[in-house]
Amino acid sequence: EVQLVESGGGLVQPGGSLRLSCAASGFTFSSYSMNWVRQAPGKGLEWVSYISSSSSTIYYADSVKGRFTISRDNAKNSLYLQMNSLRDEDTAVYYCAREFRDYYGSGSYSTFDYWGQGTLVTVSS
Amino acid sequence: DIQLTQSPSFLSASVGDRVTITCRASQGISSYLAWYQQKPGKAPKLLIYAASTLQSGVPSRFSGSGSGTEFTLTISSLQPEDFATYYCQQLNSYPLLTFGGGTKVEIK
């Protein structure tokens, strides 16, 4: 059974740092690209960051670029999000999500097929 | 950036009703669209990808259609467990993936 379990959330002051982890099990972690998605209280979903299976390709949303760093350790089946210079507007539940690709002909459709339960990050003084 | 506009943002319906949710993209995204269901306090759950492909294990009362800029999610006969918030997501323009604002389906 595929499982994604986030940890590391908590209360942090503005300007502070936090490191989130996502422990994966039930699938070959090293074969999948992964993402972080967040949801502010009472709001919709916002994609945050992407990392390819080998860590060779990394993307960030403009709202976190230069402050957040995504990484992974395939030997430990773990995904990470280092969050620095945190702001009030970073308050959210953070989810890790696996990217699934369905290949057809010369292309593929991707989607997020498994999500963790989320970890709450609260930025407040 | 590609913007996704869902309508309606709120929907009140009864068990057994046919429900349709629309997602409009600000520019063409072919069929690179997914639909998710989210219940309070839970993670989103994938329902449909590639605009119309039902994810394994998802009941057949859910269906998706559309391509280009207009997409729909249809629930053919609303069940009690379907009351939730539904989001569309475009996967055409990596890395700037975007979600729609959500449609909350509540009991009438």
Image (spheres, coloured by chain):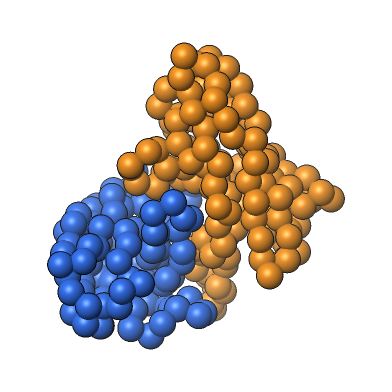
Chain colours: A orange, B blue
Quadrant assignment for the C terminus of chain B: bottom left
Q: Residue at x 17, y 62 (%)?
A: B11
Q: Is residue B55 left or right of residue B3?
A: right
Tell me where residue B82 appears, x and y as whole percent. 33, 71
Number of marks in the rendered image = 0
* Quadrant of res B36: bottom left
Tell me where residue A42 appears, x and y as whole percent. 33, 42
Q: Please tell me whether residue A83 is drawn above or below residue B35 in the rendered image.
A: above
Taking depth in this image into account, of B69 and B89 the one nearest to the observer is: B89
Query: Residue reaching furthest right?
Result: A75
Taking depth in this image into account, of A56 and A72 the one nearest to the observer is: A72
Q: Would you say residue A68 is visible in this rendering?
A: no
Q: Residue at x 51, y 22 (%)?
A: A86
Tell me where residue A99 appears, x and y as whole percent. 57, 59
Q: Residue at x 30, y 66 (%)?
A: B83
Quadrant assignment for the N terminus of chain B: top left
Q: Is residue A3 left or right of residue B92?
A: right
Q: Is residue B21 left or right of residue B48?
A: left
Q: Residue at x 25, y 83 (%)?
A: B77
Tell me where residue A7 appears, x and y as whole percent. 65, 41
Q: Please tell me whether residue A65 is drawn above or below residue B17 in the rendered image.
A: above
Taking depth in this image into account, of A9 and B67 the one nearest to the observer is: A9
Taking depth in this image into account, of A106 and A56 the one nearest to the observer is: A56
Q: Is residue B80 left or right of residue A81?
A: left
